[in-house]
Amino acid sequence: MRKVILLSFVCLSVEVFAQRSFFGVDAGINVANQRMRNHYDNDPPSISIFYQNTVKPTFGIFYQYGFNEKMGLRLGAHFWGLGYSNINSFTGDVSINYLTLPLTFQYSATPHLSFNAGAYLSFTLGGSRFNNEDITKTYHHNDDGLVFGGEHDLYKNLAISVKYIWGLKNIWLNDTQTLPSIPPITIHTNYTNRALQITLIYKFKKPS
């Protein structure tokens, strides 16, 4: 009798776990940009600008572990296209391809609406160029930052997600320059990624 009860409990636990935890795939676009900030020594005000938006692809896979019906943790592996458009510059547009590993906390406000927030770590992929050189001669090999947004179930296992990507790392390599003036002026340059991400998601789980 005890074995039957124990086996029933294990089967029930596996079924609950399977409903709360699942794999998924997503694909969509990043409406990407970069924030540039210059700060001059002995001159407190800083200058911040954004370039023109550019639209880049994104796609990937993820696994979500459900703690309970409301909360879960999602780990993904994604391709992110980021950068900016700059039609008024001789350098032209900037495109950076990343392999990105986001880790987000998921909270279900309703059975079909959830919110998420977390952090990401990105690694630069080959194929991106800037000024006819490999992109890593101008930008760092990796990036990190925050990501947060919402997700809504559309139909059965299909959902739509909207997230905001907020880069924290200064990805510009030559971040400090000294101008040969009298007295010399030191310029600190900071570039960070920004993007609005819109994706369609397919979840490999039983519809609720």
Image (tube, rainbow, N blue to C red):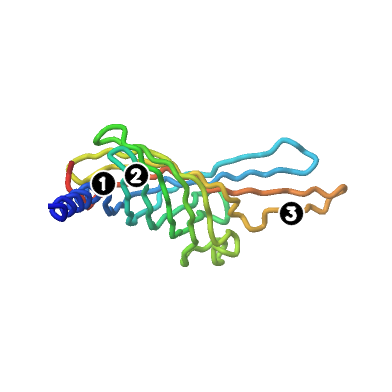
Mark 3, Cα crowd under 10 Å, few <14 / some 14-19 / many 20+, is few
Identified at 55% across, 42% down, the residue is 50
Identified at 84% across, 50% down, the residue is 184
Q: For mark 3, give the secondary structure.
A: strand
- The answer to whether the residue labelled 3 contacts the one labelled 2, judged by CB atoms less than 8 Å apart, is no
- For marks 3 and 1 on the same chain, the one whose residue lies earlier in the sequence: 1
Residue 191 pos. (x, y %): 59, 49
Question: Which one is nearer the viewer's eye here, 142 or 203?
Answer: 203
Closer to the eye: label 3 or 1: 1
- Name the amino acid, label 3: Gln
Residue 165 pos. (x, y %): 46, 45
Task: Please tell me in which quadrant of the rendered image residue 40 appears.
Answer: top right
Q: Which mark is residue 20?
A: 1
Q: CA distance from mark 1 to mark 2?
A: 8 Å
Quadrant containing the C terminus is top left
Q: CA distance from mark 3 to mark 2?
A: 45 Å
- The answer to whether the residue labelled 1 contacts the one labelled 2, judged by CB atoms less than 8 Å apart, is yes
Q: Which residue is mark 2?
A: 72
Task: Please tell me in which quadrant of the rendered image residue 131 appears.
Answer: bottom right
Q: CA distance from mark 3 to mark 1?
A: 52 Å
Identified at 60% across, 51% down, the residue is 170
Closer to the eye: label 3 or 2: 2
Q: For mark 2, give the secondary structure.
A: strand
Question: Which one is nearer the viewer's eye here, 51 or 38?
Answer: 38
- For marks 3 and 2 on the same chain, the one whose residue lies earlier in the sequence: 2
Identified at 63% across, 43% down, the residue is 37
Query: Would you say 135 lies left or right of 110 here?
Result: right
Q: Which residue is mark 3?
A: 177
Query: Would you say 174 lies left or right of 34 here?
Result: right
- Name the amino acid, label 2: Gly
- Name the amino acid, label 1: Arg
Residue 156 pos. (x, y %): 17, 43
